[in-house]
Amino acid sequence: GAVVSQHPSRVICKSGTSVKIECRSLDFQATTMFWYRQFPKQSLMLMATSNEGSKATYEQGVEKDKFLINHASLTLSTLTVTSAHPEDSSFYICSARDPGGGLAYEQYFGPGTRLTVT
Amino acid sequence: TQLLEQSPQFLSIQEGENLTVYCNSSSVFSSLQWYRQEPGEGPVLLVTVVTGGEVKKLKRLTFQFGDARKDSSLHITAAQPGDTGLYLCAGAETSGSRLTFGEGTQLTVNP
């Protein structure tokens, strides 16, 4: 199946600094990637849809200036958490859709990034 | 906004028991997917159902899509400790659209 990777898997940063998380589709080209946030024992919350070569579409309530998304190539999307604060601590997960796959609506998820802001 | 209600939220059973997880909506979905997620990892796709009334089996797991494509169920037979995890249903309104996730079912199978 399609493989999606994320880097780093864990990151600890100080309050006020910025952190970049990478999401890569390893064996397919993804024109669309998605960024989710997940709190302990809860479901996934969609933050934004990342489209290659164009601006990301953010969900209501998600600050686009705080969560910068760049989808510069068909295999890479990045999420930068700017001026991070402790309340930004969470599990961030990306997913990608394989347009060449059998079912266009299937999303494949990365392993997630645990962000801790101290 | 489409909503998916998933139940139960928490389920703790003994090894060998059977269980069913439900996913319901008042909206129609073009497809519905079931994922399983372990702590500290991303969700792993188990199955996608696209046809009303469709039934798919994956070893001891049976997935069903309602005739009206508004609901789905996951049935596990003879649960094992290795089945422990967070089970998520997710629906797509149209092909290629974003996914709407249910709240998840945290399953614990005790040996």
Image: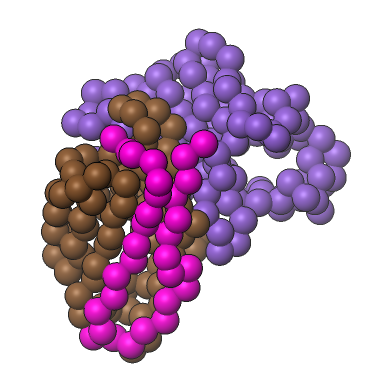
Rendering quarter of residue B20:
bottom left
Residue B32 in the image: x percent, y percent? 30, 44
Q: Is residue A60 magenta?
A: no
Rendering quarter of residue A59:
top right
State whether residue B32 is above or below residue A82. Answer: below
In the rendered image, what is the letter of the chain coloured brown? B
Tag count in the figure? 0
Residue A57 in the image: x percent, y percent? 57, 22
Q: Residue at x 65, y 51 (%)?
A: A90
The colour one sees for chain A in the rendered image is purple
Rendering quarter of residue A8:
top right
Magenta-colored span: B1-30
B50, B46: nearer the viewer: B50
Q: Is residue B6 magenta?
A: yes
Q: Residue at x 31, y 32 (%)?
A: A105
Residue ranking furthest to the right: A16
Q: Residue at x 28, y 39 (%)?
A: B31
Does residue A107 appear in this view? Answer: no
Residue A61 in the image: x percent, y percent? 70, 35
Q: In screen coordinates, is A5 left or right of A89?
A: left
Colour treatment of the image: by chain
State whether residue A21 is above or below residue B21. Answer: above
Q: In screen coordinates, is A107 left or right of A59?
A: left
Residue B103 in the image: x percent, y percent? 49, 57
Q: Quadrant of the C terminus of chain B?
A: bottom left
Does residue B29 appear in this view? Answer: yes
Q: Residue at x 33, y 88 (%)?
A: B14
Residue ranking furthest to the top: A53
